[in-house]
Amino acid sequence: KEYILLNKPKDFITTRKDTHNRKTVFDLLKGIKERVFYVGRLDRHTTGLLLFTNDGEVAKKLSHPSHKIKKIYSVLLDRNLDEINLKKIKKGLIIDDELIKVDKINFLDSRKEIGIEIHMGKNRIVRKIFENIGYKIKKLDRVAFGPLTKKDLPRGKHPLQLYSLGTPNGMKVTVLLEELLALGHEGAEYDAFLINIGEGDQFGSGFVAVNPNSKIPALLDVSTHCLLYTS
């Protein structure tokens, strides 16, 4: 079984093929040989967690309404959310002839930045909630999808970032970089981080986003966002 957790960027369509020749999320998975499908669609302008798998049972558990899987979003609004409209959201809104209630809603760093938890899987539901009360969403990011969460991939101060478990191939890359440094090549300076794929470190982090096949070691040049080497 294959499980790929993507941190979806903006302007990618959640579909396999697009009739208007726009970028799709599958363009980000070109290194994946197994045929997988996405679980939990995100619209073009929404960023965040998107799971791909060929495990039908897992997909059903995460997507069927009866399981009430929570989704958590970080929302940036065009202006401050006032107390009146906050209370309206907490009480529930009639959207498309249906009562829509969120599980939790809180302010984050400001009254324009909102954290919202909801288990309903309606299309564009978070955007519709705020549109219903006259707000525009400037940025929408899904930060949690059921048990899956988004954590930042560790990053050091140098352009070259090596993510490894200390496997033989990982050691070869390390030796190569150290030899280049010994020869005076300053451009070979790097930072190294442990990614324990046996413990699932590659999931719920930015590792899969930069290295879709999830294999280690992976050498990334963050100055050009280029994956230089992977096993």
Image: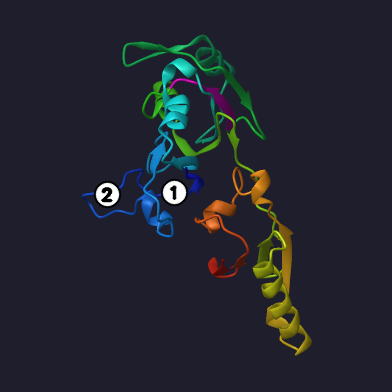
Q: Is residue 159 left or right of residue 128?
A: right
How many marks overall? 2
The one nearer the camera, 159 or 16, is 16
Closer mark to the observer between disc 2 and disc 1: 2
Residue 139 in view of the camera: yes
Q: Amino acid at mark 2?
A: Lys
Residue 198 spot, x, y in % from top left: 66, 47
> Does residue 102 lie above or below 79 as drawn?
above
Q: Is residue 52 left or right of residue 201?
A: left
Marking on residue 170: none
The one nearer the camera, 14 or 82, is 14
Reading the image, the residue beneath label 2 is 17
Q: Who's the residue at 61% across and 29% down the image?
A: 111
Q: Who's the residue at 36% across and 48% down the image?
A: 35
Q: Quadrant of residue 168?
A: bottom right
The image's colouring method is rainbow
Q: Quadrant of the C terminus?
A: bottom right
Secondary structure of the residue carrying tag 1 is loop
Magenta-span inclusion, residue 114: yes
Q: Amino acid at mark 1?
A: Lys
Residue 157 in view of the camera: no
Marking on residue 10: 1
Magenta-drawn stretch, dominant element (helix, strand or loop)? strand
As measured in the structure, the alpha-carbon distance from the residue carrying label 2 to the one carrying label 1 is 17 Å
Q: Give the residues drawn in magenta, as a range.
A: 113-120
> Does residue 223 lie above or below 18 as drawn?
below
Residue 76 spot, x, y in % from top left: 54, 36
Secondary structure of the residue carrying tag 2 is loop
Magenta-span inclusion, residue 201: no
> Does residue 173 lie above or below 25 as drawn?
below
The one nearer the camera, 146 or 71, is 146
